[in-house]
Amino acid sequence: MAQETNGLPDEGLSLWLTDWKDSTSTLWPGRHLVASIGRSVAGQIDFFLHPDGQALKVGMLRVHPDFQRRGLASVMMDALYEAHPTAWINHGWRTPQGARWWNGYQEPAPQRNIHNRPPGEWADYFDAVDVAADKAQNAHINTSHGLDGHQDAVYRYGERLETEAALHTAAFRPATPVRMDPTAQPLYGAARLVLPPAIHDFVHDRTKDRHARAAALLEHIGHGNLPRDAHWNATRDAAFADAHHEELFNSQPSGPATHVVFTLPPVDADLLPQAHALATSIELRHRGGLAVAVTELSWRHADRPHTTHTAGFTPAVPAAIAPLSAQYASTAYQNRYDEKGFLRPAARGDTRPFADRAAQIQALAERLLRDQASRLRALRPQPAAQATIVPQQQTPQQRAPGPGRRA
């Protein structure tokens, strides 16, 4: 691309595909293609993928200002074509900035761009009238900015909308949405943590027993603190991708981050709360805390994703997805967890063996204290009685004056 001449760094560029969890406006699952350089997001393509994988629509392509005019947009678009090598691609309409970029982009497979092919080939996937409107918008932008826009490759550029509608609208078939079923498969949810140094060193020490490390990690998190805002995924890798996505797009932690994935068994249909299901993930919507069980814990250092620690729990460990806030916590949640989401002593099994004899034990304690006080009083030494002094009568000899004494 002639406009982007500064080039990209020789190393450190990463491209990865991940779910777009907030795609609620279409029946097609949303996806991201994210470009990162070092620990920074450099660019991203948002797109929707047909459930059968044979068509996609680009929603947005953006590059961070620090990485513009360096060929990154072209690298990302080329990667999108390569990731879906047989799919029809609908680029939609373009902004003026997007039209200027497209004018210099060399498309790797123009025969799969639906703007270059007759609607009869792709009308099962896309509404022909909508596509014609996008093409008209792009033609207007190109004319306004003096751009060619590869118009020679565009099939029947400027075809009348009513003609497109008459010929091809009936061919469009809306996709049947694919939705994850949480009652039929395990769920995987992620959390991103910055652990205290001692706990961080222990849970990542492969020389220590992994089950002890998993138990310590879950104890530190709190059994009632499973992430409320997480999308619960169909695979563990997808959950780790969520944690990595948060690592890139949110503020950097103050210390080394640990990505943790909780594995839950399928949810009982009778206990399933309101939920928003996507193709490969589900958001469980509840306010008061949701009782679940953890069958496995996996974790990895954010900077060393190739090293993953995993430990299973047999039997599964009772836990809970955190409530919306402490004030919304259900009675069952409050009975098991404190206001910070940690197990109460009774839930840990630290029950007192004589809890049902509290009144009897209290009375016994009071009697023992009274008896002890009585014994102490009996053993305390009594003060000696003071002697009574009786004055004696003096004889005449005793009253005689002595030397130096006057008579």
Image (cartoon, rainbow, N blue to C red):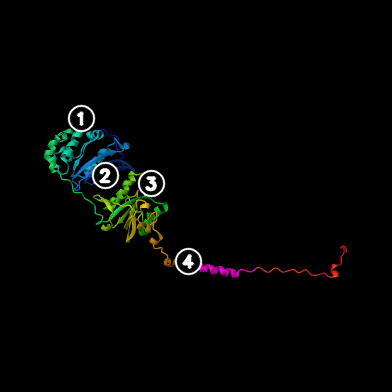
Image mark for residue 32: 2
Amino acid type indicated by mark 4: Gln
Q: Distance between the residues labelled 1 and 3?
A: 48 Å
Residue 3 in the image, given as x and y percentages of width and height: 26, 33
Residue 67 is a magenta residue: no
Sequence-first tag of 4 and 1: 1
Kindly identify the residue that appears in the image at 36 percent across and 57 percent down: 331
When the figure is inspected, residue 332 is found, relative to residue 251, above or below; the finding is: below
Q: Distance between the residues labelled 2 and 3?
A: 23 Å
Sequence-first tag of 2 and 3: 2
Looking at the rendered image, the disc whose residue lies closer to the viewer, 1 or 3, is 1
SS at badge 2: strand
Crowd class of label 1 (few under 14; some 14 to 19; many from 20; radius 10 Å): few
Looking at the rendered image, the disc whose residue lies closer to the viewer, 3 or 4, is 4
Q: Mark 1 points at which residue?
A: 143
Crowd class of label 2 (few under 14; some 14 to 19; many from 20; radius 10 Å): many
Q: Mark 3 points at which residue?
A: 253
Amino acid type indicated by mark 3: Pro
Q: How far apart are marks 4 and 1 (CA)?
A: 92 Å
Q: How far apart are marks 3 and 4 (CA)?
A: 51 Å
